[in-house]
Image (tube, rainbow, N blue to C red):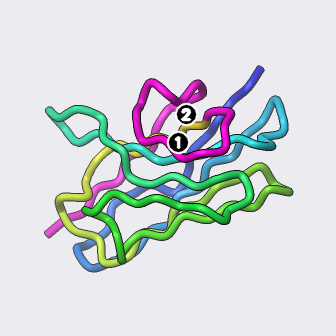
């Protein structure tokens, strides 16, 4: 059974940092693109960032570019999201997701596996 499990969420003040982790199990995620989405209260789920299997390609939403960094450890089947200079508008449940493919897609329906989400709250 394939599982993605997020961790690392929490409460942080504006300007602070958090690192999220997403550990995959049940298979080797070779040739899988892995991404992060988020959903703020009362809003739809939105794309944040994604990374190719090799780590050679990444794509960031404009809202997080320059503040967030995604990277992965293929040996550990784990992807990380380093979040710096956090803003209250970053408050959301963050979801890890994955799909088999090479090119990075940002549409939710492209992703076949999802984690349960981890809450990030940024106070002003």
Q: Quadrant of residue 46?
A: top left
4 left or right, relative to 81: right
Q: Residue 106: x and y, percent?
A: 42, 41
What secondary structure is marked by label 1?
Answer: strand
- For the residues marked 2 and 1, what is the alpha-carbon distance in whole angstroms? 5 Å
Q: Residue furthest front?
A: 103
Residue 71 drawn in magenta: no
Query: Who's the residue at 83% across and 32% down the image?
Result: 27
Which residues are the magenta region? Answer: 99-124
Disc assigned to residue 115: 2
Image vertical order of residue 27 relative to residue 31, above or below: above
Q: Quadrant of the C terminus?
A: bottom left
106 left or right, relative to 79: left
How busy is the neighbourhood of tag 1: few (under 14 within 10 Å), some, or many (20 plus)? Answer: many
Q: Residue 45: x and y, percent?
A: 30, 35
Q: Residue 12: x and y, percent?
A: 32, 68
Q: Quadrant of the N terminus?
A: top right
Image vertical order of residue 37 relative to residue 3, above or below: below
Query: Who's the residue at 60% across and 37% down the image?
Result: 98
Disc assigned to residue 9: none
Query: Who's the residue at 62% across and 39% down the image?
Result: 5
Which residue is labeled 1 in the image? 96
How busy is the neighbourhood of tag 2: few (under 14 within 10 Å), some, or many (20 plus)? Answer: many
Q: Nearer the viewer, residue 34 or 81?
A: 34
Q: Residue 116: x and y, percent?
A: 51, 31
Q: Nearer the viewer, residue 30 or 1?
A: 30
User: Given contact means CB atoms under 8 Å apart, are the residues at marks 2 and 1 in contact?
Assistant: yes
Image vertical order of residue 76 relative to residue 6, above or below: below
Q: Quadrant of residue 112?
A: top right
What secondary structure is marked by label 2?
Answer: loop
């Amino acid at each position: 059974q394939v599982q993605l499990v997020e961790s690392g969420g929490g409460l942080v003040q504006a300007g602070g940092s958090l690192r999220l982790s997403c550990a995959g199990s049940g298979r080797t995620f070779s040739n899988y693109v892995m991404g992060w989405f988020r959903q703020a209260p009362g809003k739809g789920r939105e794309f944040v960032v994604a990374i190719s299997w090799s780590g050679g390609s990444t794509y960031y939403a404009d809202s997080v570019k320059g503040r967030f960094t995604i990277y992965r450890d293929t040996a550990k089947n784990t992807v990380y999201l380093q979040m710096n200079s956090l803003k209250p508008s970053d408050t959301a449940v963050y979801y890890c997701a994955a799909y088999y493919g090479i090119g990075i897609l940002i549409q939710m329906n492209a992703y076949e596996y999802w984690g349960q989400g981890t809450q990030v709250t940024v106070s002003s």
